[in-house]
Amino acid sequence: MSGVLFLLPALLIFGMFFYLPFLQSIYYSFTEWNALKPPRFIGFDNYVNLLKDQRMKDGFFNTMKMVVFGVIVQNTLALFLAVMLNKPFRTKAFLRTSLYLPIVISLVVTSIIWGQLLNYEGLFNGILVRVGLESIIQDWLGTVQTAFPTIILLTQWQGIGYCAIIYLAGLQSIPNDIYEAAEIEGAKGFTLFRTITLPMLMTTVSVVLFLIIVGGLRLFELPYILTNGGPGTSSYTLFLAVYNAAFQNTQYGYATAASIVLAFFIIIVAIVQLRITSKREVEL
């Protein structure tokens, strides 16, 4: 009983700043509210309108592209880099630090710098002109075909190093005795990776995939600063759609409904992913 009394103040504060706003958000999602007039209850209209909103649909599909690309490409490259950096060589400390540095830089600063580098008169196009590739220069963030692919690649530039460091920590936790025993039995190269490294690394894989999926679903800063979802809705994301509904169109009830749907979607995807990967985990 005394333990509960000690926990009670923390639980009250947590409930006040988490559960109470969450319950209020659920109520506001069923209302028409612009923050100037009192909320007006409209039932499920906001949720029905979400299914009809083309900008929300475009944001959803772009967000899913980001998630799929991250799971396939970012995850694979991060694991490959971690395996390479786990080998003994002279400059591994420098390379590990260099790989992690992009995650330390603020996304706002990163977005501004890349925006300057990738505009039509930026450094990237200047390099293409110098090497004789004038035919492919363009405003990489200003065309429908290249805006969102460019943003996806920029997220990988910052995210791969972070995931690689997590994988590296997982690789270093695998005992060398297991590798030595497998090598005595004749296992080499990719066979070692497939039969020893990957099964032993599945707990880390679960963590990395969770971070990639949730990070992809929450993508906001880069498209907001670089393109604001444009041109058109070519680089629109779900988080950007929610932000614009709330702070540009002052549709707070509608934006709240969208954010709740997004939150539950993230929870469902995360649970499914964790269950799939946890079945393959091997205890050390």
Image (tube, rainbow, N blue to C red):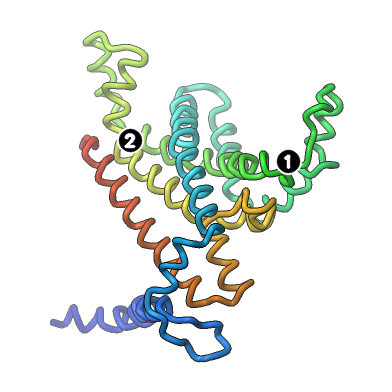
- Please, is residue 138 above or below residue 261 in the view? above
Say if residue 106 shows up in the picture.
no
Residue at 27 percent across and 17 percent down: it is 180
Q: How many marks?
A: 2
Q: Nearer the viewer, residue 212 or 137?
A: 137
- Please, is residue 215 above or below residue 257 in the view? above
The disc at residue 173 is 2
Residue at 36 percent across and 81 percent down: it is 20
Q: Nearer the viewer, residue 73 or 188?
A: 73
Residue at 47 percent across and 22 percent down: it is 88
Marks 2 and 1, the one that precedes in the sequence: 1
Check disc 1 and report the residue beneath it.
140
Q: Is residue 137 left or right of residue 76?
A: right
Q: Amino acid at mark 2?
A: Ser
Q: Amino acid at mark 1?
A: Trp
Task: Label 2: state its secondary structure.
Answer: loop
Q: Nearer the viewer, residue 173 or 116?
A: 116
Say if residue 254 shows up in the picture.
yes
Percent of width and height locating residue 183: 27, 13
Task: Label 1: state its secondary structure.
Answer: loop
Disc 2 from disc 1: Cα separation: 42 Å
